[in-house]
Image (spheres, rainbow, N blue to C red):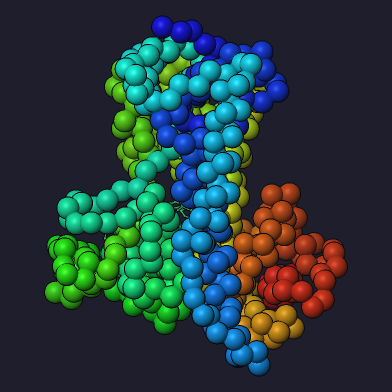
Amino acid sequence: MTHFDIAVIGAGSGNFLMNRSLSDQQFAVIEEDRFGGTCLNVGCIPTKMFVHAAEVAAQVRDAARFGVDATVDQVRWTDIRDRVFGRIDPNSASAHQHRENGENTTVFTGHATFTGDHSLSVTTAGGSEEVIADRIVVAAGARPTVPAEIAQVPHHTSDTIMRIDALPRSLTILGGGVVGTEFAHIFSGLGVEVRIVNRGTSMLRKIDTEICDRFTALAREQWDCHLGQGVARAETTDVGVSLVLADGTRVESEMLLVATGRVPNADRLGLENTGIELHDDGRIHVDEFGRTTADDVWALGDISSAHQLKHIANHEARTIAHNLAHPEDLQAFDHRFVPAGIFTNPQIATVGLTEDEARRAGHRITVSSRAYGDTAYGWALEDTTGICKVVADQETGLILGTHILGPDASTLIQPAIQAMSFGLTAREMARGQYWIHPAMTEVLENALLGLGR
Ligand SMILES: Cc1cc2nc3c(=O)[nH]c(=O)nc-3n(C[C@H](O)[C@H](O)[C@H](O)COP(=O)(O)OP(=O)(O)OC[C@H]3O[C@@H](n4cnc5c(N)ncnc54)[C@H](O)[C@@H]3O)c2cc1C
Ligand SMILES: NC(=O)c1ccc[n+]([C@@H]2O[C@H](COP(=O)([O-])OP(=O)(O)OC[C@H]3O[C@@H](n4cnc5c(N)ncnc54)[C@H](O)[C@@H]3O)[C@@H](O)[C@H]2O)c1
């Protein structure tokens, strides 16, 4: 049995806790898989590296529209894959090594479960070890869900599909959420026939309705979409896998990717041995400072947050690091304006309330939408589908939400996030600064001016 000041379960965002202000603390860092967690190894970073490769290919295919004739001769999948993981794997290994060599860190490679509020059993390759700690931070993340009707047929999840040895000719994606639409973009960009089966009648159902409807129509144009239907049964066939839908339609592809959501890993932590309480959806319950319902046990990121996003997990890790170092001066999480970027085709970015949410919350709102194609740079792009929408409060003039669909949406939205975070009104934001002409940001300027205050 070894005693530590702080034990951290999970070296994804949990690996950022060990900063200078806690250098006098002895840490146990417990990780059962790779350092860097989901984002580095199987999430944000590799997916965006693949998205870029897919967009290079898509741009070549689209070049003739601009008077440039070019063709994609070949997609060297294994070269693309090995470039991605040739950068990522050493990064993860060096993060691990850094903690192995750290003066105040001891790494345990294995699966941690609680045996009490401050005691853990770590199952390692060599047996099991007991770790006792005065304070424990749970940063154990989430994992992909696989519906029972799929479990018995060969399938991938986002954890495995990026390391396949060869591209399939066709891919069925079950789920039309963020993971499903990003992989649809990646694989269709690389030349794979993509089919999507989604229970909901629209894709990305949580986003603003206008953007959602527009994106769903564009998804139907580029992928073979089967929406509003569950899977009655799944079968292995000569081709690969066939999903039989409720109406009898068979959707068959060489490969199947399941992207039906992610569940917090709280069910695998022996929490029944602790005072840690859960939400109904399986997340660990934390207060605004990151404290669970057990004394001196904290939690952050996908295991506890309502937002499964890396920038949120990072923010929560920074806040908890501060709170561990300064228990007399606790800081609260800031979840007021949580932005998200969806790196599909077209890209989508969103922050704050959708139009419907703003109405339901009782705001008297003013709404303005502007097309990319109505700005000079939108002309240069020949864009016909992009849109920027701003929702503001009529009385205060404050921006309640911003929603963008189109190239570089996740970059274009940042001034809106800044204005919302610092309390600038839409008018101040539109009129109180220069907007570079003819940059794509003019679409946001025009949407703000369209609010009419
Ligand atoms: C395909 C994909 C793409 C994504 N893209 C984006 C994006 O573009 N932008 C964005 O903001 N977010 C994105 N996300 C979400 C983002 O990756 C997560 O929100 C974020 O990584 C969560 O961080 P975390 O530290 O909470 O969990 P993780 O990074 O998952 O870390 C948890 C760690 O705990 C370890 N662990 C779990 N249980 C135990 C245990 N009992 N004992 C020991 N170790 C344990 C795990 O092995 C893991 O390393 C994406 C997710 C996926 C799946
Ligand atoms: N760019 C990003 O920020 C990014 C990228 C990837 C993932 N993520 C995070 O990961 C989380 C999980 O993403 P996700 O796409 O797996 O989940 P999701 O909740 O976004 O989407 C799941 C989809 O699967 C559908 N579905 C669920 N069960 C089904 C079934 N049995 N049959 C058919 N369809 C079914 C749902 O209707 C939904 O459309 C996201 O919420 C997001 O927070 C973020």
Q: Residue 71's spot in the image, x, y percent?
A: 55, 84
Q: Quadrant of residue 127?
A: top left
Q: Quadrant of residue 246?
A: bottom left
- Image quadrant occupied by the N terminus: top left
Say if 221 sits above or below 425 in the image: below
Count of numbered badges drawn on the protein: 0
Q: Residue 143's spot in the image, x, y percent?
A: 37, 43
Query: For this view, does 98 lie left or right of residue 425?
Result: left
Say if 192 sits above or below 259 in the image: below
Say if 380 sits above or below 344 in the image: below
Say if 178 sits above or below 67 in the image: above
Q: Residue 393's spot in the image, x, y percent?
A: 64, 61
Residue drawn at point x = 79 percent, y = 78 percent = 438
In this orientation, which residue lies closer to the viewer: 191 or 25?
Answer: 191
Query: For this view, does 64 lie left or right of residue 205?
Result: right
Ligand 2 appears in which quadrant? bottom left
Residue drawn at point x = 58 percent, y = 80 percent = 60
> Is residue 324 visible in this depiction of the protein?
no
Q: Quadrant of residue 243?
A: bottom left
Residue drawn at point x = 61 percent, y = 72 percent = 407
In this orientation, which residue lies closer to the viewer: 353 or 347?
Answer: 347
Residue drawn at point x = 16 percent, y = 63 percent = 236
> Is residue 303 visible in this depiction of the protein?
yes
Q: Residue 321's spot in the image, x, y percent?
A: 62, 26
Query: For this view, does 451 lie left or right of residue 277?
Result: right
Spot the residue most to the bottom. 67
- Image quadrant occupied by the C terminus: bottom right
